[in-house]
Image (tube, helix red, strand yellow):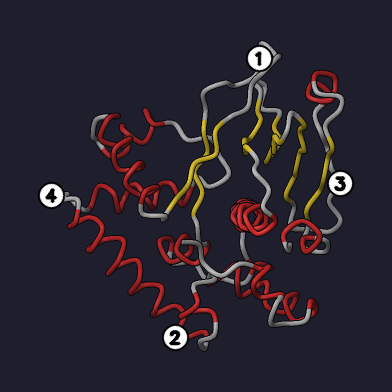
Amino acid sequence: MYPVSLTELAGSFERFRIDEMIDGLIRFGSYPDIAGRPESQKTTLLDELTGDYLFRDVLRFENIRRPEIPVNLLRAIALQVGNEVSLRELSNLLKVAVDTVQRYIHLLEQSFVVFSLPSFSRNLRNEISRGKKIYFYDTGIRNSLLQNFSNPSNRTDIGPLWENFCLIERIKFNQASGRKVNMYFWRTYQQKEIDLLEESEGLLEAFEFKWSGKAKIRIPADFIRTYPETAHHLVTRENYQEFLIA
């Protein structure tokens, strides 16, 4: 059900070749019919895919009479990747009921267009316990919605885009490795946060995703005190293969 994974690519290409491909995968995604095409064809095919599949077949199948609403919803989600989603804010933006927003998000999740990451809360009083973030199964779809296929070095949104890319590849990694994990983000009301928490057999692992290899991992002190046994990882452009290729 997923686009091609880095693990699958590693079965056909040397690791250094994957490093050369990574910018293109972030920009155009990894649907098989798109990944091997020339750049000019990739943008055309992605635009056709978002138009023909997302905005016609899926929405018509569900008998949605106002397709502009989920289209605008997807674009709003694309702009908020990496941020906690407020259903009330989306409702106000789209001028529809919160229940309608929830229904469309559920439809898009069932169609493997987006997926949700819930918040983690166990001990701290100031942990956000009911929030969620929404990401795309394919970053090419996200970039097509925003009509932005710029190189990573020229993007102001490379942080959330890299986060989205790493999250879906981590999901594929866990599946390929046979790992059964629960996945969350963590945040406090003071805006201290961790991009990804994995919970498996009672143990936690924390992940921060930073495009720059010069970044330093910064786990909030509140989290360390509350969950002292947690392993911490920083995933960057330089070491991503260690965490994303099974």
Q: What x and y, as percent, mark residue 118?
A: 54, 33
Q: Residue at x 44, y 51 (%)?
A: 114
Q: Is residue 233 left or right of residue 110?
A: right
Say what amino acid the circle numbered 4 marks.
Answer: Arg
Say what amino acid the circle numbered 1 marks.
Answer: Asn
Residue indicated by mark 2 = 41
Q: Is 134 rendered above or below residue 151?
A: above
Q: Residue furthest bottom?
A: 38
Residue indicated by mark 3 = 216
Residue indicated by mark 1 = 126
**Labels 3 and 2: the sequence-earlier one:** 2
**Labels 3 and 1: the sequence-earlier one:** 1
Q: What x and y, as percent, mark residue 107?
A: 31, 46
Say what amino acid the circle numbered 3 marks.
Answer: Lys
Q: What x and y, as percent, mark residue 153?
A: 69, 68
Q: Is residue 69 left or right of residue 87?
A: left
Q: Residue furthest top?
A: 125
Q: CA distance from mark 4 to mark 2?
A: 31 Å
- Nearer the camera: disc 4 or disc 3: 4
Q: Residue at x 51, y 49 (%)?
A: 135
Q: CA distance from mark 3 to mark 1?
A: 25 Å
